Image (cartoon, rainbow, N blue to C red):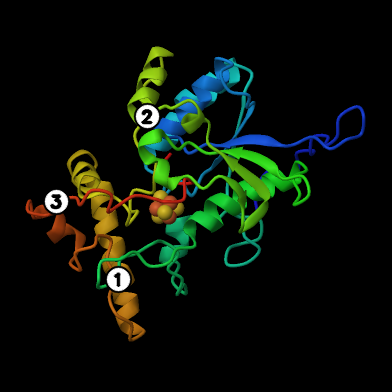
């Protein structure tokens, strides 16, 4: 499922032979998980392993990938912290051993799969498999490789801040029972603005919110920002929406959208009368956008 097949697995037991608990942070390359990285470097939280599940070079916002590679990884290395990048390597659908990206799955000519939370005609996001397939399972495979089991689950820290507390679901993940979720930013009472300050005080540039640039959970403001600052990515998102609908029409299926307005993205974002409803958008899992 994940990369790095040739790297030897670390030992799973201490000198007394008892199993150690695997501990890691799910690193998204955004504000909250970068704050966790700084806190770990400063010794404020006890995590030495950060796992970044990259959903695709053609899917993550390029700024996020630049930040992970140019800022976070050198910072982690200089503080003795392992920041490991992982990719989804499925058993079928792509050439053996090749990684699969979210964009790649969506645009594959023979694909009928719709893993992202596209909006239906009523504006509600559909079910999604992207977070589970490209984040939870990819990180989970690495945790199991390091010794996590249902009997001795890994402790996985997720970057949820106090202002997003409703996203937190502490304890054993019922869909991945070899991992127990913890939320250090909540324990420390930190808000997103605190995280930004902590990152800046450490001398690091503050990253953007991490997510696929075409994620249907974007707020209108995020779409407008994408259009303003990276029009080529906005165009690609518009193309994706239209491409998905062409395919769905050929299959006799109803249309889907990247926003909740039931209209093409380009029209919606040009319409200055579309406002964000508080709490209407965002990822509720804690695995994306951190
Ligand atoms: S950012 Fe959005 S589209 Fe990308 S994996 Fe997460 S939920 Fe899916």
Where residue 128 sits: x, y (%)? 45, 63
Q: SS at mark 2?
A: loop
- Looking at marks 2 and 3 on the same chain, the residue that comes earlier in the sequence is marked by 2
Q: Are marks 2 and 3 in contact (CB under 8 Å)?
A: no
C-alpha span from label 2 to label 3: 24 Å
- Looking at marks 3 and 1 on the same chain, the residue that comes earlier in the sequence is marked by 1
Per the image, the residue denoted by label 3 is: 275
Q: Is mark 3 within 8 Å of ligand 1?
A: no
Q: Are marks 3 and 1 in contact (CB under 8 Å)?
A: no
Residue 120: mark: 1
Left or right, 218 with respect to 76, comes to left
Per the image, the residue denoted by label 2 is: 191
Q: Relative to residue 91, is residue 45 depicted above or below?
A: above
Residue sitting farthest toward the right = 16
- Looking at marks 2 and 1 on the same chain, the residue that comes earlier in the sequence is marked by 1
Q: How many marks?
A: 3
Q: Residue at x 48, y 39 (%)?
A: 28
Q: Residue at x 40, y 34 (%)?
A: 162
Q: Residue at x 36, y 84 (%)?
A: 251
């Amino acid at each position: 499922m994940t990369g790095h097949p040739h790297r030897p697995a670390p030992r799973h037991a201490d000198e007394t032979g008892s199993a150690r608990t695997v501990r890691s942070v799910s690193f998204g390359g955004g504000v909250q998980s970068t704050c966790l990285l700084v806190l770990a470097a400063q010794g404020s939280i006890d995590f030495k392993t950060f796992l970044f599940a990259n959903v695709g070079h053609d899917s993550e916002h390029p700024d996020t990938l630049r930040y992970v590679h140019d800022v976070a990884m050198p910072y982690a290395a200089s503080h003795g912290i392992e920041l490991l990048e992982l990719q989804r390597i499925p058993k079928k659908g792509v050439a053996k051993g090749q990684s699969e990206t979210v964009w790649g799955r969506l645009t594959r000519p023979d694909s009928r799969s719709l893993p992202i939370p596209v909006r239906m005609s009523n504006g509600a996001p559909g079910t999604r498999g992207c977070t589970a397939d490209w984040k939870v399972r990819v990180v989970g495979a690495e945790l199991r490789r390091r010794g996590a089991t249902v009997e001795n689950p890994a402790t996985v820290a997720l970057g949820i801040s106090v202002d997003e507390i409703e996203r937190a679901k502490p304890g054993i993940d019922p869909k991945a029972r070899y991992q127990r979720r913890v939320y250090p930013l909540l324990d420390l009472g930190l808000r997103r603005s605190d995280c930004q300050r902590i990152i800046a005080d450490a001398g690091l540039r503050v990253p953007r919110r991490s997510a696929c640039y075409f994620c249907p959970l974007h707020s209108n403001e995020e779409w407008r920002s994408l259009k303003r600052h990276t029009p080529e990515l906005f165009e690609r998102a518009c193309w994706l929406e239209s491409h998905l609908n062409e395919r769905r029409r050929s299959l006799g299926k109803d249309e889907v959208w990247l926003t909740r307005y039931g209209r093409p993205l380009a029209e919606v974002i040009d319409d200055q009368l579309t406002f964000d409803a508080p709490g209407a958008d965002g990822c509720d899992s804690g695995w994306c956008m951190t």
